[in-house]
Amino acid sequence: MTVRFALFGAGRIGKMHGENLTRRPDARLLYVVDSKPEAAKSLAESLGARAATQEQVLADKNVDAVLIASSTDTHADIAIAAAQAKKAIFCEKPVDLKLERVDDTIREVEKAGVPMLVGFNRRFDASFRALKNQVDAGAVGTVEQVLIINRDPGLPDLAFLARSGGLFLDFTIHDFDMARWLLGEEPVELFAWGAVLVDARVATEGKDIDTAMIMMRTASHKMCHITNTRRAVYGYDQRIEVFGSKGMLRAENLNPTTVERFDAAGVTADRPYPGFQSRYDAAYAAELSEFIAGVKRGTKVSPGPRDGRQVVVLANAAMESYKSGRPVKL
């Protein structure tokens, strides 16, 4: 079976997903949709597809699935329309910045009975997946502590920050998903610190923060510590540690090569990858494989829209805690 796609979004992420689709023998990209018709046309032509409107795509019975990589404020509307048209849905995170719209999406997706995967790609990273499998197999015994480090190499465009939903909803949202996945339980209490330590313009122009630490605990008192910053001068810092009653598992940074140089000045090696697309290139391809396999089987896929809901709950709680200076019970 070949799964036939329409791609929404002709920007950086849309282009990456489109290229991944064209590499697969079990997928075919039929259409590209974008709010800028010229951008849709340009990307479609480069990928052997056609530019189209949302109405054309959803009316076409040849389209089996939509891949939503457009701006965040369009995700829920497109997902709801796609569900009503009985199309399978791959949606980049987050489903929406507002919990009410996430709930609207869940309701329509479940009513339609179509598979929907939310793009939390880090679950599909080979190292993180191997760590999770060992946790599930009991390698560390009972999980007691999870540490997640997520540090960007540098600030994104300040105009993007102002419309992104903020650090917690745009950036930490990946870490909230990883925390839930690794803890195996829902957090019941959360405390967050936030600050502007990287660039004062983040507060004045981006209306945001650029640095945060979050602590969470579950009902059984498992704990998780998340650390975030928008600036790590040495590269894209992505590490996880899971500590339990029988030991510890750790997933370290990936570097472009494993070559180390030893000389009189010391020992040097490659810096970590410079950004998320190069670091998680294989993970993006793997999550697409998971989605296509689910569409072929006609089964649910994971992470789904209810996972997408829980991370918005956590992000909102983090913002509340940061502003109030108090822990938030969930």
Image (cartoon, rainbow, N blue to C red):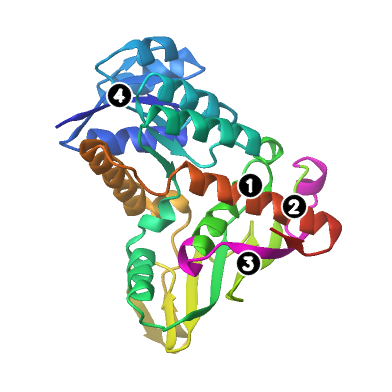
Q: Which mark is residue 169?
A: 1
Place of residue 193 in the rendered image (x, y in percent of width and height, measured from the top left): 76, 64
Q: Secondary structure at mark 1?
A: helix
Structural crowding at the residue carrying mark 2, measured as other residues with C-alpha within 10 Å and reported as few (<14), some (14–19) or many (≥20): many
Tell me the quarter of the image containing the N terminus.
top left
Direction from residue 233 to residue 244 in the image, left or right:
left
Q: What amino acid type is highlighted by mark number 2? A: Met
Q: Amino acid at mark 3?
A: Thr
Q: Which numbered disc covers residue 140?
A: none
- Cα gap from disc 1 to disc 2, whole angstroms: 9 Å
Cα distance between the residues tagged 3 and 1: 15 Å
What is the three-letter code of the residue carrying label 1?
Leu
Circle 4 residue: 46
Callout 3: SS: strand
Give the number of the mark in front: 2 or 3: 2
From the top left corner, tell me how far across and down residue 296 is, in percent.
21, 37
Q: Nearer the viewer, mark 3 or mark 1?
A: 1
Asked if the residues shown at circle 3 and circle 4 are in contact, with their CB atoms under 8 angstroms apart, the answer is no
Between the residue at mark 3 and the residue at mark 4, the CA separation in whole angstroms equals 39 Å
Question: Which residue position holds label 2?
Answer: 319
Q: Between disc 3 and disc 4, whose residue precedes?
A: 4
Q: Residue furthest front?
A: 111
- Asked whether the viewer can see residue 98, the reply is no
Q: Say whether disc 2 or disc 4 marks the residue closer to the N-terminus.
A: 4
Q: Indicate left or right for 307 with 136 as reference.
A: right
Q: Is 201 situated above or below 172?
A: above
Residue 194 within the segment the image draws in magenta: yes
Q: Are marks 1 and 2 in contact (CB under 8 Å)?
A: yes
Reading the image, the residue beneath label 3 is 227
Residue visible at 56% across and 45% down?
309
